[in-house]
Amino acid sequence: FEDEGRAFHDGSDTRWTAENRPATVNWALNYYNSSRVMTRSGNLVIETMREDAAWIEHDEDGNEFPFTRNYQSGMLTSWNKFCFTSGMVEISFQFPGRPDKGGLWPAFWMLGNLAR
């Protein structure tokens, strides 16, 4: 993540992809927006903003269902791009906010390609 201003839109990076889709677990209030993921000062930065994201989905009959999420954040995946069979991955990260205040559920997950 050393390159300044690196973007992770689909197809722009050989190892990572930032998602563009609603979060779908635990009644999440956020929409994953790839423009919220970037590099700055040698670090990966994932921003969370209180900003509406609206979209329309369709059922099998073509009926429209409008959706809105009030927060946007980012999610970075390496599905079928960054695979290894041995070695070590070392990370260091800082979660936002205070540990005694609720409201955010930041996480770092490592899953193998078959764990999806």
Image: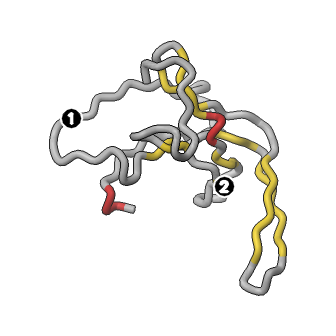
Between residues 34 and 13, which one lies in front from this camera angle?
13
Dots 1 and 2: beta carbons under 8 Å? no
Q: Residue furthest left?
A: 86
- Reply above or below: 90 against 104: above
Left or right of residue 22, residue 95 in this image: left
Q: Spatial distance from mark 1 to mark 2, Cα to Cα? A: 31 Å
**Secondary structure at numbered mark 2:** strand
Q: Could you tell me which residue is drawn at 60 percent across and 40 percent down?
A: 74
Q: Percent position (x, y) of residue 113?
A: 33, 57
Q: Could you tell me which residue is drawn at 66 percent across and 55 percent down?
A: 22
Mark number displayed over residue 88:
1
Circle 2 is placed at which residue position? Answer: 22
- Reply above or below: 19 against 95: below
Res. 7 image quadrant: top right
Which amino acid type is shown beneath numbered disc 1?
Met
- Reply above or below: 116 against 108: below
Q: Percent position (x, y) of residue 4?
A: 52, 17
Which amino acid type is shown beneath numbered disc 2?
Pro
The local crowd at label 2, few if under 14, some if 14 to 19, many if 20 or more residues have their Cα within 10 Å, is: many
Q: Could you tell me which residue is drawn at 63 percent across and 50 percent down?
A: 20
**Secondary structure at numbered mark 1:** loop
The local crowd at label 1, few if under 14, some if 14 to 19, many if 20 or more residues have their Cα within 10 Å, is: few
- Reply above or below: 32 against 58: above
Mark found first going from the N terminus, 1 or 2 = 2
